[in-house]
Image: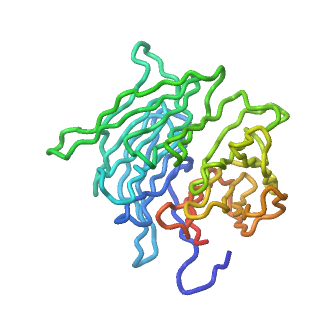
């Protein structure tokens, strides 16, 4: 990546704690706004809303709020038109929906599918449906996936008008479910469970993450736990990978499809590398990435900005960096 030119190619923010969960805002009036979740191995954790001041090229913290346990994922409502309330969702012990204001963020609703127990099964991940933002799906270590319906009313004073109900619960697995992802094709869902196919992963490591291609719903990408390899699948022939991306030299932690292109994907790993790949030549082997960036630490997460597709965000240690691609 070139670091030359009139505009900075990299912007950096240092949080007061290790950053794990992280995501871009989608609203058109909130450019360069991200949510960051802390990873502190205790009950008290934090979420920060940060934004880039484009005049002085510095990230500033807009507000910080408490969160029980580390967030396994944070995600803004996929509302590119600004038609819905400014909502943020987090997963951890439960799925929580927050309303973000200019100076404060407050809890709108807590979605709990296990009303009959004092104990909760932690949520490993969730996804927010881009086609219908009233739908969210969660995955849990209790072997289930839950599809939630969200109702968002008009703002009347300070009354909480966001509520949710269970639309579907899927108990389709015999092991923990580590991720869930909606496809843009008619709301199709994919979920990754512990019992990964041996043909995808001969060591039978659990599949940890999956992500649908944003432009071509026939393709999705997945990776196994503790694996240095990323596997691209075609759902029309799901048992045979169409490509394997294996240039990383340590465990892969994050994968993100380009929002504007069906043939570009970014992978990030504990080898400090974020790699961008061009997969146009599939099913021929993809030998090398087209771009590589080396961070100052093990990369925990990568997100490609939906509404600003020339920007990618990564986090490592206590740092967030956004990279112009």
Quarter-of-image position of residue 111? top left
- The quadrant of the image that shows the N terminus is bottom right
Q: Can residue 217 be seen at all in this image of the molecule?
A: yes
Residue 223 locus on image (x, y percent): 72, 43
**Is residue 210 left or right of 184 when viewed as pictured?**
right
Q: How many marks?
A: 0
User: Residue at coordinates 72% horizontally, 46% vertically from top-left?
Assistant: 233
Where is residue 4 shown, x and y percent of the image?
Answer: 63, 84
Considering every residue shown, the one lying at the far front of the view is 236
40 vs 242, nearest the viewer: 242
Specify whether 281 is left or right of 30: right
The image quarter in which residue 225 lies: top right
Vertical relation: 149 (above or below) 62? above
The outermost residue toward the bottom is 6
Judging depth in this view, the residue of 157 and 185 nearest the camera is 185
How does the figure colour the protein chain or chains?
A: rainbow
The answer to which of 90 and 242 lies nearer the viewer is 242
Q: Residue furthest top?
A: 116
Q: Which percent across, then down, holds residue 221?
A: 68, 48
Q: Residue at x 48, y 46 (%)?
A: 74
- Estimate the x, y position of residue 13 in percent, counting from the top left: 51, 63
Quadrant in which the C terminus appears: bottom right
The answer to whether residue 315 is seen in the rendering is no
What residue appears at the point 48 percent right and 24 percent down from the top-left corner?
169
Instruction: Pick whichever, 255 or 231, lies toward us.
Output: 231
Q: Residue at (41%, 28%) from the top-left corner? A: 167
- Residue at the extreme left of the image, as rendered: 157
In the rendered view, would you say 93 is above or below 249?
A: above
């Amino acid at each position: 990546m070139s670091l030359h030119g009139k505009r900075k190619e990299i912007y950096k923010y240092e949080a007061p704690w290790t950053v794990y969960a992280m995501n871009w805002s989608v609203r058109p009036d909130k450019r360069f706004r991200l949510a960051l979740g802390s990873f502190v191995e205790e009950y008290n954790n934090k979420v920060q809303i940060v934004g880039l001041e484009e005049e002085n090229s510095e990230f500033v913290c807009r507000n910080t709020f408490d969160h029980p346990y580390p967030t396994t994922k944070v995600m803004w409502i996929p509302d590119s038109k600004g038609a819905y309330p400014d909502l943020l969702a987090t997963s951890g012990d439960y799925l929580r929906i927050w309303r973000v204001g200019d100076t404060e963020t407050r809890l709108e609703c807590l979605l709990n599918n296990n009303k009959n127990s004092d104990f909760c099964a932690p949520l490993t991940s969730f996804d927010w449906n881009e086609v219908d933002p009233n739908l969210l799906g969660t995955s849990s270590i209790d072997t289930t996936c839950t599809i939630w319906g969200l109702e968002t009313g008009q703002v009347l004073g300070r009354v909480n008008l966001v509520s949710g109900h269970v639309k579907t619960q899927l108990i389709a697995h015999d092991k923990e479910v580590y991720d869930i992802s909606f496809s843009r094709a008619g709301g199709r869902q994919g979920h990754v469970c512990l019992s990964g196919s041996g043909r995808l992963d001969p060591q039978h490591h659990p599949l940890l993450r999956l992500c649908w291609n944003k432009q071509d719903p026939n393709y999705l990408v997945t990776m196994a736990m503790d694996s240095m390899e990323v596997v691209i699948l075609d759902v029309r022939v799901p048992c045979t990978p169409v490509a394997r991306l294996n240039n990383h030299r340590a465990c892969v932690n994050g994968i993100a499809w380009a929002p504007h292109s069906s043939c570009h994907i970014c992978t990030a790993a504990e080898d400090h590398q974020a790699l961008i790949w061009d997969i146009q030549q599939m099913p021929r082997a993809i030998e090398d990435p087209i771009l590589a960036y080396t961070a100052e630490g093990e990369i925990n997460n990568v997100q490609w900005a939906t509404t600003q597709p020339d920007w990618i965000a990564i986090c490592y240690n206590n740092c967030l960096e956004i990279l112009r691609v």
